Image: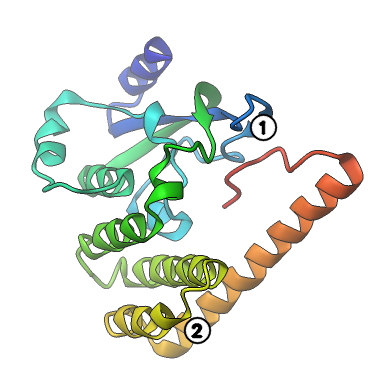
Amino acid sequence: KLRRQIDFLDAMPQLVAAYSNAIVVDEGGNLRGGFNKQIPSSFGMGFLLRKGNFLCHSSLIYRAKFSSYILAISPPFIDYQVHLILAQQGKLGYINSALVGYHVASTTSMTVLKVDHVRDLYWQALMSVEKSPQLNQDIGSSMAQFLFISLWNLISMKKFSSISSLWKTVTAVIPISIYKFLYLFSYFFFEHLWFKSKNFLCIKILRRPLKVYFER
């Protein structure tokens, strides 16, 4: 893993860091497939904002000269803030081979045990990105995706009282028009339904879930 990523960074000196795909296994040790679909070998902040936290953090390797930016982040924080901080320094690289493993929905996972806390830290990561004319559309897209996923989880957990306050919190700071934001929110809604439908059909017909765990 490290040898391939170091060679990758040596061959592309403009890159700040490198990630890779991962093999996904469930709690029973069963293979679920790959973490991502095909990802560009090089991408910037805009792509990372539009796609959300699609990177497998355990695959990360970054140049030592950028460590001060990571160490300067005040805890607590989640991995997405690390990725965004690195993306502010330059392009990120991606190797589409699965060089690490990812244990999905383990009983000790923060995303399982501390859903509200993870949501707050994700929002903190988004708010750390400085708004600019070049990034505002991508930031707005990322906020729309964040709001949709958060509301979906709140509804799933029957925490209906939190929906209104979260909606107001996000829409109060969006850097795009409310009409564009609602369009993006609707897009993520139907995209998620399509993904859920495909996954359901694969389980019912093929007796296995989709081969890609994190489809974005």
Residue wearing tag 2: 182
Task: Kindly identify the residue that appears in the image at 35 percent across and 38 percent down.
Answer: 92
User: In which quadrant of the rendered view does residue 130 lie?
Assistant: bottom left
In the rendered structure, which amino acid carries the disc numbered 1? Answer: Gly
Does dot 1 land on a helix, a strand or a loop? strand
Residue wearing tag 1: 33
Residue farthest along the right direction in this orientation: 205
Q: CA distance from mark 1 to mark 2?
A: 33 Å
Q: Residues within 10 Å of mark 1 (few under 14, many from 20)?
A: some
Task: Kindly identify the residue that appears in the image at 41 percent across and 65 percent down.
Answer: 142
214 left or right of 15 in image? right
Tell how many labels: 2
- Taking depth in this image into account, of 84 and 112 the one nearest to the observer is 112
Q: Nearer the viewer, mark 1 or mark 2?
A: 1
Does dot 2 land on a helix, a strand or a loop? helix
Q: Position of residue 24 (x, y in %)?
A: 59, 31
81 left or right of 19 in image? left
Q: Quadrant of the N terminus?
A: top left
In the rendering, which numbered label is found on residue 77?
none
156 left or right of 46 in image? right
In the rendered structure, which amino acid carries the disc numbered 2? Answer: Leu
Q: Earlier in the sequence, mark 1 or mark 2?
A: 1
Q: Position of residue 78 (x, y in %)?
A: 29, 47
Q: Residues within 10 Å of mark 2 (few under 14, many from 20)?
A: some
Task: Kindly identify the residue that appears in the image at 26 percent across and 49 percent down.
Answer: 81
Residue farthest along the top direction in this orientation: 3
- Taking depth in this image into account, of 42 and 74 the one nearest to the observer is 74
Q: Position of residue 26 (x, y in %)?
A: 61, 32
